[in-house]
Amino acid sequence: MSTNEQLHPEQQRVHDDQTINVMVRYITATRQFVDPRAPREKTLASLKQQVLTFYGLVEDATKTYQLALGSIVQTNLSADLGALAGTAHELRFNLTEVLKQG
Amino acid sequence: MASELELALFEEEFIAVQSLPEATRWQLERDNSVPLGLFAVMHPISSPTELYKARIRWNTSYFAPFSLKYVDMNTGAENNPTAWPLCPGFRPASFDTCITITSEGHALHPEWAGQFPKVALPMQHALLHLQLLLDNSYMGRARR
């Protein structure tokens, strides 16, 4: 018998359809950021902030960070994960540091 | 002189990076003339037939900026400008780069000292950074 915490398989399927397994690799680091159930409506800006916090990183006047979907840098941070994923259920990003060069 | 820790991590990473999703696009080869060096053949995502052979060497420390040269795919010559991709900060005419991840860039810009990130996986960092440059800012092959 189901409890409040357990979802019926059909409910689970719908829930899974509304979420995406997101993995972000900071290219200097050993540990990956993983959110197995990121909401499809979550924006890249929100994801990026979450990832920066996870790695203890802060942007400042001398450096910023870029999220790349695979190897393609994402410049529209208001895009949401669902739009990027389409019918896929998984997104893999790389996070890289960009120093502002003199 | 590379430490045992650096040599061990280099060996470990040389195997590990070949499991990265991006590695399906790479041909990696050790540079046996130095303790901490490799060659990586890569291509921009926009031009899959344009191959470039990067020579990556950590001459001072495995955790410091690395030396980057592009060598001739056929001969290995280091003095062929057309072996170089054009990306911002790449200077094929002088066979070096003025970018923040390379030792050549740091030699040109002493003010960058201290701005190189703490790197736990130097080889992964170098290879993925170079691939990101090729895929996002490639402007063609350099000419003589």
Image (cartoon, coloured by chain):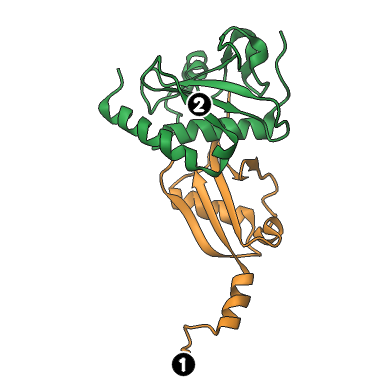
Chain colours: A orange, B green
Q: Chain of mark 2?
A: B
How much space separates mark 2 and mark 1, taking CA atoms?
57 Å
The disc at residue B101 is 2
Q: Residue at x 51, y 17 (%)?
A: B109
| Discs 2, 1: same chain | no
Q: Residue at x 62, y 19 (%)?
A: B90
Q: Position of residue B60 (x, y in %)?
A: 36, 18
Q: In this orientation, which residue lies closer to the viewer: A19 or A57?
A: A19
| Mark 1: amino acid | Met
Residue that sits furthest to the left in the current view: B4
Q: In this orientation, which residue lies closer to the viewer: B2 or A33?
A: B2
Q: Secondary structure at mark 1?
A: loop
Label 2: how many Cα within 10 Å (few below 14, some 14–19, many 20+): many
Residue that numbered label 1 is attached to: A1
Q: In this orientation, which residue lies closer to the viewer: B108 or B45?
A: B45
Q: Position of residue A39 (x, y in %)?
A: 60, 66
In the rendered image of this protein, does residue B51 appear above or below residue A34? above
Q: Residue at x 45, y 29 (%)?
A: B116
Q: Secondary structure at mark 2?
A: loop
In the rendered image of this protein, does residue B72 appear above or below residue A23? above
Quarter of the figure with the C terminus of chain A: top right
| Mark 2: amino acid | Ile
The disc at residue B12 is none
